[in-house]
Amino acid sequence: MADPECSICGRRACYLRRYSGQRFCAEHFVEYFEAKVKRTMLRYRMLARGERIGVAVSGGKDSLTLLSILSTLAPKLKLELQAILIDEGIAGYRAETVERARRFCSELGVPLLELSFREHTGLSLDEMVELSRRNACTFCGVFRRRLLNAAARKLGCDKLATGHNLDDEVQAILMNYLRGDVERLLRLGVSTVSKKLVPRIKPLMEMPEKEVALYALLSGIPASFEECPYAGDSFRTDVRDCINRLEEKNPGIKFSILRGYQKLLPFLESHEAGALRRCATCGEPSSGERCKACLLIEELSRSASR
Amino acid sequence: MKVKVLVGREEREVEVKEGASVAEVLEALGINREEVIVKLGGTIVTEEEPLEEGSRIELIRVISGG
Ligand code: SF4
Ligand SMILES: [Zn+2]
Ligand SMILES: [Zn+2]
């Protein structure tokens, strides 16, 4: 068998995009990737000239790739970037990724705001997990979203950009389907849920996780490839394995899932559950009378006093 | 033929048929190609890359989960 060659220049290929049959050498892969992310941002009108963009960074490949691409676009679009880092408090994992995020932000000249679970809820994620039987990712997701939104709002950001890739999106879509959680399913796909929430953009949402990792490696982005110690035992992991098995046999199925969901969105939007109120306790946006973050904090303090 | 596979710090040896590709090695190991990037001799290659007796590939997991 001949060595796999780039479909554009004939050099040795480093990536086969199975769902289109194209092969790319390193140089053409990087070119394709950047062009596609830009196309995605245009297509969904994610950015407008002169906006202040909050960028959630963790030090992983997704967020640092996002920051890198946005920073190349910033001068032309007159964007003002502001990186936001949430330290959940995960021993043996977060310290290293935080360090990487700091270094990359200063290299790019992007200001970085750091917040921690500990200073905002009184507990680190590790401590929450010790107090509760709940999955770490439940606390992590709820408090991270809360802190990011509050920070972006305080900093006066017009948008909040996160590094969610195609795999993250498709996993979330299927998880919500499987749980029958129509409300979360809806909120996943709309950028502006309410005036109380800073509109979210996900410029990498059409890029498969493997492509993001490859881009980060090929462009020398100093990202961490470590896995969170809590990543193994979640529902998400089962869903991810299942989707990747399907994708292996049916290349392109991740895109079909995303497209199908996008077709459903207009119908979901007529669902009344999309409306947000203010939490009776903290005043933050909430779908119920009290927000998920407040409910979790109360639950934790009950466990702590027991 | 035998090829060597480096995953993290662990090295394994796999028996595959003559002229097998990276994809066949991953299949033999039960590793999903969506979840790894493969290096051969320090260069990133596609899963179609043909291997030889004694080839040594390195797998980089792309899943960060967090
Ligand atoms: S795997 Fe779970 S606990 Fe770890 S960073 Fe992701 S959401 Fe948080
Ligand atoms: Zn090329
Ligand atoms: Zn609240």
Image (cartoon, coloured by chain):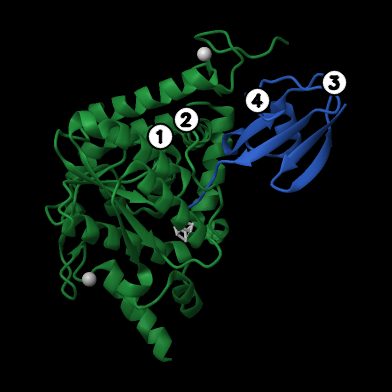
Q: Which of A159 and A130 is in front in this view?
A: A159
Q: Chain B is drawn in which colour?
A: blue
Query: Residue shown at 60%/12% (left/top)?
Result: A5
Query: Which chain hosts label 4?
Result: B
Query: Residue shown at 30%/46% (left/top)?
Result: A110
Asked if labels 4 and 3 touch by Cβ distance under 8 angstroms, the answer is: no
Q: Position of residue A102 (x, y in %)?
A: 40, 53
Residue of label 4: B47
Tell me the amino acid under the disc marked 4: Glu
Q: Please say whether residue A74 is visible from this viewpoint.
A: yes
Residue of label 3: B18
Q: How crowded is mark 4: few (under 14 residues within 10 Å), some or many (20 or more)?
A: many
Say which label, 3 or 4, has the lower sequence index.
Answer: 3
Residue A253 - label:
2
Q: Is mark 4 on a helix, strand or loop?
A: loop
Tell me the amino acid under the disc marked 1: Ile
The C terminus of chain A is located in which quarter? Answer: bottom left
Residue A257 - label:
1
Give the Cα separation between the discs numbered 2 and 3: 32 Å
